[in-house]
């Protein structure tokens, strides 16, 4: 394994945990994409801090995608105990909507009550998969942005090209 390659997994888990918690909490989740971008940028910062070399945009993309997947897992796990709160809010919204609309399909309340109270592992994993795909895409952008901001290492200034005949610098 190349020792010059930065270690990305732990920073991605840290950034994903921060982004997942913030995007999973009610009233903070309205900025979900911003939290994912910020978590991926945090992971890129942590990776760049410990890396002896400058990071490339591809490194940022990998860091961001890993951060997005970690954030999706944390977000889904936080969402499980908060499911009742979301159900109550949705129920109240649907009741208000039914007062103003006569065009609702018959039996919509039975369908809503059944889906709001039952837990389905298949739907949980489908939601997790969709969230992971979306969060990974958004995290990729955040990782690239984070590498652009934090991933460049300051090194010695590059030498100017030399003239092959005289051996001195090329005059412009």
Image (spheres, rainbow, N blue to C red):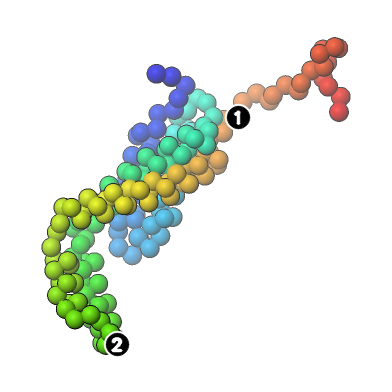
Q: Position of residue 149 (x, y in %)?
A: 55, 42
Q: Is residue 27 above or below residue 158?
A: below
Q: Is residue 170 above or below residue 69?
A: above
Location of the N terminus (image quadrant): top left
Q: Which residue is mark 2?
A: 100
Q: Position of residue 79 (x, y in %)?
A: 24, 57
Determine whether, in the image, residue 24 is placed left or right of residue 115. Answer: right
Of tags 2 and 1, the one toward the viewer is 2
Q: Position of residue 101 (x, y in %)?
A: 29, 86
Choose top left, top right, bottom left or bottom right for residue 171.
top right
Determine whether, in the image, residue 57 is placed left or right of residue 40. Answer: right
Residue displayed at 86% across by 12% down: 166
* Secondary structure of residue under mark 1: loop
Determine whether, in the image, residue 113 is placed left or right of residue 101. Answer: left
Q: Is residue 89 above or below residue 11?
A: below
Q: Which residue is mark 1?
A: 154
Residue displayed at 28% across by 49% down: 129
Q: CA distance from mark 2 to mark 1?
A: 62 Å
């Amino acid at each position: 394994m190349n020792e010059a390659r930065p270690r990305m997994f732990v920073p991605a888990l840290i950034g994903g945990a921060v982004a997942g918690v913030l995007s999973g909490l009610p009233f903070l989740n309205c900025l979900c994409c911003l939290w994912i971008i910020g978590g991926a940028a945090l992971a890129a910062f942590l990776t760049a801090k410990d890396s002896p070399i400058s990071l490339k945009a591809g490194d940022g993309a990998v860091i961001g995608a890993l951060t997005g997947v970690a954030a999706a897992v944390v977000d889904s796990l936080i969402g499980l105990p908060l499911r009742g709160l979301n159900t109550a809010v949705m129920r109240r919204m649907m009741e208000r909507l039914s007062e103003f609309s006569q065009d609702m399909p018959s039996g919509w309340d039975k369908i809503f009550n059944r889906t709001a109270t039952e837990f389905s592992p298949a739907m949980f994993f489908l939601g997790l998969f969709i969230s992971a795909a979306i969060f990974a895409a958004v995290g990729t952008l955040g990782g690239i942005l984070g590498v652009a901001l934090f991933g460049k290492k300051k090194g010695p200034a590059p030498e100017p090209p030399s003239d092959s005949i005289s051996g001195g610098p090329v005059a412009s």
